[in-house]
Image (cartoon, grey):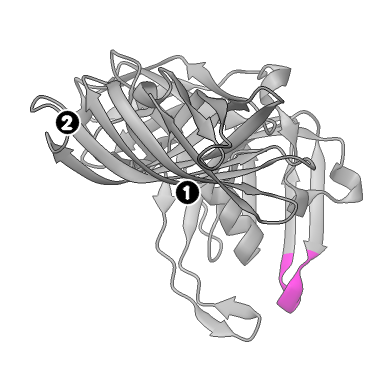
């Protein structure tokens, strides 16, 4: 599954005009209010998910100083990072194209935790519903799109929205907005988002062990949170891993949502108590399902000292619920 980016959402939903230009892969950016990060950003990367099971971080050479950064995208990304065009671009003339879309750059601290997520553009949208259509979009963003061959894509969507785009082999700067608003994006103003702490490394630390089934009919289960990525607004974490029982092992993917954070609470006084919900879905099969419920965790210095997950396993085929609890 490709990373569901802000730029991709804009193109898919609004089918707004898009314009591209090739460039050499070097991004020079001034960050709005960026001086507060001068001593915090140690390295850069891009998070990409080229299939349903594995997400990777592509390290980017770069420096951060004086409220801005310079990073260099790989001249030719490794094939494992490339995926097909999203299905809403998949026309006959594009079905074999391999691509990588970058519209977020992550800044990491000295302990490899995500300090900030950088974007260029605006996320504010105003629209009026008109039946199945919408109008008056105020949306503009910049992305960097790699394709492994020259390609032109064009089609007409619902409500007579016309879309066309030409991409050249290599990296392209793609502008999406409500009109011909071409800017020199290689020196544009970027904005960053960072909220609270990054618990991604903490959640990826342990196996969680527990039981699946009602009292008297339980069987052991293990959950492994293999890769954990923080979403840009800081409270949502994408989880990739697997579940394991005596009968089967299934890949899973889903979301942790932290809704409350308290110093101490039910944890020790020097720890943070985290509360939230989880929704993890196993790869579809006749015997698979999804896990959903709530959790409480204790975190100290980027590690979980304990965590308790309570909820149900919901079978895909018939929606039946089976109690499932696991703990770290």
Q: Is residue 312 above or below residue 309?
A: below
Q: Nearer the viewer, residue 129 or 171?
A: 129
Q: Quadrant of residue 58?
A: top right
Q: What is the x, y in percent for residue 114?
A: 35, 27
Q: Quadrant of the N terminus?
A: top right
Q: Is residue 17 visible?
A: no
Dot label at residue 294? none
| Residue at 22% from the left image edge and 22% from the top image edge | 40
- The secondary structure type at the circle numbered 1 is loop
- Identify the residue at horizontal 31%, vertical 30% (top origin): 198
* 191 vs 4, nearest the viewer: 4
For residue 132: magenta?
A: no
Residue 224 at x, y percent in the picture: 52, 23
State the CA–CA distance, disc 2 to disc 1: 50 Å
List x then y, in percent, for residue 146: 67, 32
* Left or right placement of residue 303 versus residue 21 in this view: left
Answer with mark 2 or mark 1, whichever residue precedes in sequence. Answer: 1
Q: Which residue is mark 1?
A: 183
The residue located at (80%, 51%) in the rendering is 153
Name the residue beneath numbered marker 2: 267
Residue at screen point 81% across, 41% down: 151
Q: Where is residue 78 drawn, in percent x and y?
A: 68, 16
Q: Are marks 2 and 1 in contact (CB under 8 Å)?
A: no
Work out whether residue 318 can be spotted.
yes
Point out the stretch of residues depicted in magenta. Answer: 156-162
Locate residue 149: give its quadrant: top right
Please indicate whether residue 131 sits to the left or right of residue 124 in the image. Answer: right
């Amino acid at each position: 599954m490709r990373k569901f980016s802000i730029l991709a959402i804009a193109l898919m939903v609004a089918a707004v005009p898009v314009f591209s230009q090739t460039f050499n892969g070097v991004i020079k950016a001034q960050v709005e209010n960026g001086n507060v990060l001068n001593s915090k950003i140690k390295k850069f990367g891009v998070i990409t998910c080229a299939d349903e099971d594995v997400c990777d971080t592509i390290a980017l050479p770069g420096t951060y100083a004086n409220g801005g950064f310079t990073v260099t995208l790989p001249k030719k990304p490794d094939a494992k990072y490339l995926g097909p065009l999203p299905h809403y671009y998949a026309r006959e003339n594009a079905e074999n194209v391999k691509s990588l879309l970058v519209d977020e750059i992550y800044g990491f601290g000295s302990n490899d935790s995500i300090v900030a997520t950088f974007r260029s553009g605006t996320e504010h949208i105003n629209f009026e519903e008109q039946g199945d259509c919408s109008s008056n979009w105020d949306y503009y963003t910049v992305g960097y799109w790699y394709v492994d061959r020259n390609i032109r894509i064009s089609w007409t969507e619902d409500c007579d929205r016309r879309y066309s785009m030409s991409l050249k082999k290599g990296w392209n700067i793609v502008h999406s907005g409500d009109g011909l608003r071409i800017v020199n994006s290689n020196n544009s103003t970027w904005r960053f988002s960072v909220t609270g702490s990054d618990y991604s490394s903490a959640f990826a630390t342990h196996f969680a062990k527990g039981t699946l089934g009602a009292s008297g009919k339980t069987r052991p289960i293990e959950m492994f949170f293999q890769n954990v990525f923080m979403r840009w607004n800081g409270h949502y974490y994408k989880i990739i891993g697997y579940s394991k029982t005596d009968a089967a092992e299934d890949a899973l993917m889903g979301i942790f949502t932290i809704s409350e954070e308290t110093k101490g609470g039910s944890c020790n006084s020097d720890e943070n108590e985290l509360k939230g919900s989880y929704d993890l879905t196993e790869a579809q099969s006749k015997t698979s399902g999804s896990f959903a419920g709530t959790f409480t965790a204790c975190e100290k210095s980027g590690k979980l000292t304990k965590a308790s997950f309570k909820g149900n396993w919901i079978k895909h085929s018939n929606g039946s619920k089976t109690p499932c609890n696991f703990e770290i």
